[in-house]
Image: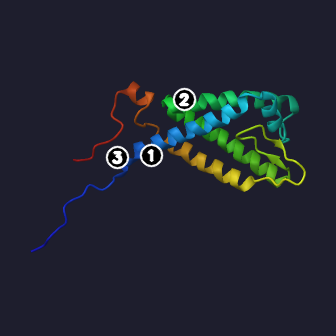
Amino acid sequence: MTVTAPRTRALRWPAVRPWLGTAARLGLAAVWLLAGASKVDDLAAAGRAVNAYQVLPYDVATVVGAALPFVELALGVLLLLGLATRLTAGISAALLVIFITGIASAWVRGLAIDCGCFGSGGQLAEGQAPSYLPEILRDLGFLVMAGFLLIWPRTPVSVDGWLTGEPVVEDDDE
């Protein structure tokens, strides 16, 4: 006589995936909203932060710096709503690759700057050490979140889901 334990329903990837996507979507939305909100008050400082990377001409850097908070806020709102999630994740991934490359470039070139990711940024005070590795690792984590949403953009509680009218969580009781 064989005794078996009662069948318990294990967590299955199709059931968990949409909720991980929701966490990634809302987490990335929070990142973009915080980043944009921290810079929107002082667009000149945001321009100086971009200029500190010494990659773009000053005039271009100030325009990019002034526009960036509004792009970040727009990405945050779109992700928060779950609207055009795959497109928004793709733009997020592209921006994060640019940010990671910029930080790595500043590190390799020996610049002593604050990335300006969540504030004004720019040149660091004399003797103040930059923290490039933690910034790169943080942005790589955000890039993983964006990548997840590129592959699996459909999440519960999103405008994308309401527009399609299709269930997001798959039932695999078959």
Residue 17 as seen in the image, left or right of residue 79: left
Residue 19 position, x and y percent, is: 41, 43
Q: Residues within 10 Å of mark 3 (few under 14, many from 20)?
A: some
Judge whether 102 appears above or below 40 on screen.
Answer: below
Q: Secondary structure at mark 1?
A: helix
- Labelled pair 1, 3 in contact (Cβ < 8 Å): no
Q: Residue furthest top?
A: 163
Q: Amino acid at mark 1?
A: Leu
Image point 9% across, 74% down: which residue?
1
- Labelled pair 3, 2 in contact (Cβ < 8 Å): no
Residue 138 position, x and y percent, is: 64, 50
Q: Quadrant of residue 8?
A: bottom left
- Of the numbered discs 3 and 2, the one sitting upstream in the chain is 3
Measure the alpha-carbon separation of dots 1 and 3: 10 Å
Residue identified by numbered label 1: 20
Measure the alpha-carbon separation of dots 1 and 2: 18 Å
- Of the numbered discs 1 and 2, the one sitting upstream in the chain is 1
Residue identified by numbered label 3: 15
Q: Which mark is residue 78?
A: 2
Q: Residue furthest bottom?
A: 1
Nearest to the observer: residue 31 or residue 71: 31
Residue 142 as seen in the image, left or right of residue 64: left
- Which of the colour schemes (rainbow, by chain, secondary structure, one colour) is used? rainbow
Q: Amino acid at mark 3?
A: Ala
Image point 71% across, 28% down: which residue?
40
Residue 52 position, x and y percent, is: 84, 41
Measure the alpha-carbon separation of dots 3 and 2: 24 Å
Residue 42 position, x and y percent, is: 77, 29
Residue 8 as seen in the image, left or right of residue 166: left
Q: Amino acid at mark 2?
A: Leu
The answer to whether any part of residue 89 appears in the image is yes
